Amino acid sequence: MSSQPISYDYIVVGAGSAGCVLANRLTEDPSVRVLLLEAGGKDSNPWIHVPIGYIKTMAMPGLNWLFDTEPDPYTYNRPIPIPRGRVLGGSSSINGMLYVRGNALDYDGWAQFGNRGWSYDDVLGYFKKSENRETDLSEYRGSGGPLNVADMRESHELLDAVIETADGLGYPRNPDYNGASQDGFGYFQVTQKDGRRNSAAVAYLNPARNRPNLHVETNAHTKRIVFDGKRAVGVVYDKGGAEYEARAGREVVLSAGAVQSPQILELSGVGRPDVLQQHGIAVHHDLPGVGENEQDHYVARLVARINRPITLNEQTRGFSMVGEVLKYAFGRRGILTYTAGIVYGFVRSRPEVASPDLQFHVAHASFKDPKKRILDHEPGITIGPCQLRPESRGTIHIKSADPFAAPAIRPNFLSAEMDRATLAAGMRIGRKLISAAPLSHYVDAETLPGPDCATDDEIIDFARQTGATLYHPVGTCKMGSDPMAVVCDQLKVHGLEGLRVVDASIMPTLVSGNTNAPTIMIAEKAADMMKAEQR
Ligand SMILES: Cc1cc2nc3c(=O)[nH]c(=O)nc-3n(C[C@H](O)[C@H](O)[C@H](O)COP(=O)(O)OP(=O)(O)OC[C@H]3O[C@@H](n4cnc5c(N)ncnc54)[C@H](O)[C@@H]3O)c2cc1C
């Protein structure tokens, strides 16, 4: 162990979406000293900041933990990539930048489980506080907050046709899916500013970096929490092969994300006794919910060949690309500002459901090899539905006592009948879209899954063989008061003192949408709760 432990008020582990918010908000009070520990490095790679660089950073070892799932029979034992940001900004530095809050009923559901202060009315103020919505302000939207929420800078005739077709099929154009109603189709809102990524590091951490009461340590991998009895008093971390200890007078906060917050708890002897003992870790605190309750969005993709060369498949090649680079360099416009999905759809698979249970991500591009992100040679469109509130539950547990070893991620995608039925319904809605005008005028043929895939069983089989995560693991340190809950509604770890978890892992159920904005909201609220306790 190198040197004497340095003491802070708070130690925040992980400088991702949540950790950056906490670092900023907690150090607004100059008397509060915060140490922010991040296993990854600085966010200086230019691909982070140019939106289309997303396609590259998804698979870049230096910026990404590049986890894979364990073999799982429901998805034919395929290792499914689970990218996670390993850099300042965490996953917000490599994500698709889509700004989505989910549905008001998600949060009302959290409150109904007994989590006081988490209904939509309670959390709306934190969504508004966090954002600077550039346009279309309403009672639901905020301005002046750190996180810039812009409209997509480019539209496209094929995507306009998707929206018009959806409207004709009864899925209305929605002026703001983060406002009064979520249902319908339109262009995504994005966490970008002036055509550049607005990660949590850019939005929250950079403005606070010069505060003398904030110490940010990069390439600092937290190995375990230090306890004094049942109280967390610090952490041990590795930097450059040397071991250091830092002390927290008030609290240790885990913000290492849904994959690694449970890992750090287990490495520290907090979790399911059988899991800990299997790896020779002494049980410090029996907490059976750690690493359980994992939930994630699973997408299957419908691809159609387009009958004219207007898609990204062609625009990203040769001279077209040179033109696009110049367009971006001189005006921050063009295809380099595009993100993962460009048009969204929030749809109810059945009239009985109280809110949309399907989300579509649509892009005027298609991949020959989705894993390697190699685009098709012929023009294409991809329509990806996912079941928004999956009933499949998975786990994330350590595979070894080695803090540098990847944990075992077992999402059990498609293990629940409801998830399979809803996904099949989504694929059928995708087919309706490509078959109806005006979109049908552009479509040559469905190439994936293709016309031979007709029955629900065949569609599900295709989904099992080819589906992927939408990168939204949550729930592994769930908030609640039942025996499987890890944190209470103040996000304090049950049965321990001086220890909170603040990140996507605390969501008791997955929200009906992408998870960055909700995670930032969670951290805004947590910072307020922590400040209130200081007072
Ligand atoms: C490829 C991809 C695309 C996505 N697209 C979208 C999107 O378009 N819209 C959306 O809303 N959401 C999207 N998401 C999801 C969203 O970004 C995440 O839900 C959110 O960023 C999670 O925030 P977090 O704070 O929980 O974890 P993270 O942001 O992942 O932060 C965890 C941090 O902890 C660090 N860490 C981990 N272990 C340790 C350790 N032992 N010691 C020190 N540091 C450690 C990590 O390096 C990381 O920086 C995407 C995610 C990915 C990966």
Image: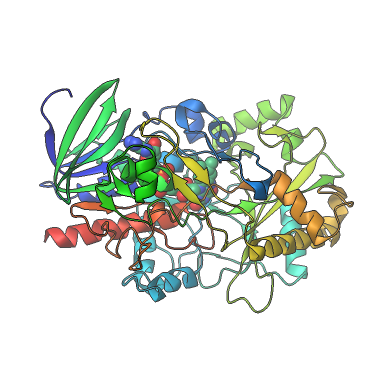
How many numbered dots are placed on residues in this image?
A: 0
For the C terminus, the quadrant is bottom left
Residue nearer the viewer, 451 or 378: 451
Residue at image position (81%, 49%) is: 449
Left or right: 16 as drawn, with respect to 527: right
Residue at image position (29%, 35%) is: 222
Left or right: 331 as drawn, with respect to 313: left
Residue reaching furthest bottom?
A: 352
Residue 191 seen in the figure: no
Left or right: 457 as drawn, with respect to 16: right
Residue nearer the viewer, 347 or 186: 347
> At which x and y percent is residue 406?
45, 34
Q: Is residue 284 above or below residue 139?
A: above
For the N terminus, the quadrant is top left
Q: Is residue 343 above or below residue 108?
A: above
> At which x and y percent is residue 376?
77, 35
Residue 354 seen in the figure: yes
* Residue 247, quarter of the rendered image: top left
The chosen color scheme is rainbow
Residue nearer the viewer, 188 or 515: 515
**Quadrant observed for ligand 1 in the rendered image:** top left
Residue at image position (17%, 62%) is: 532
* Residue 417, quarter of the rendered image: bottom right
> At which x and y percent is residue 148?
43, 50
Residue nearer the viewer, 161 or 212: 212
Residue at image position (38%, 57%) is: 289
* Residue 5, quarter of the rendered image: top left
> At which x and y percent is residue 92?
44, 43
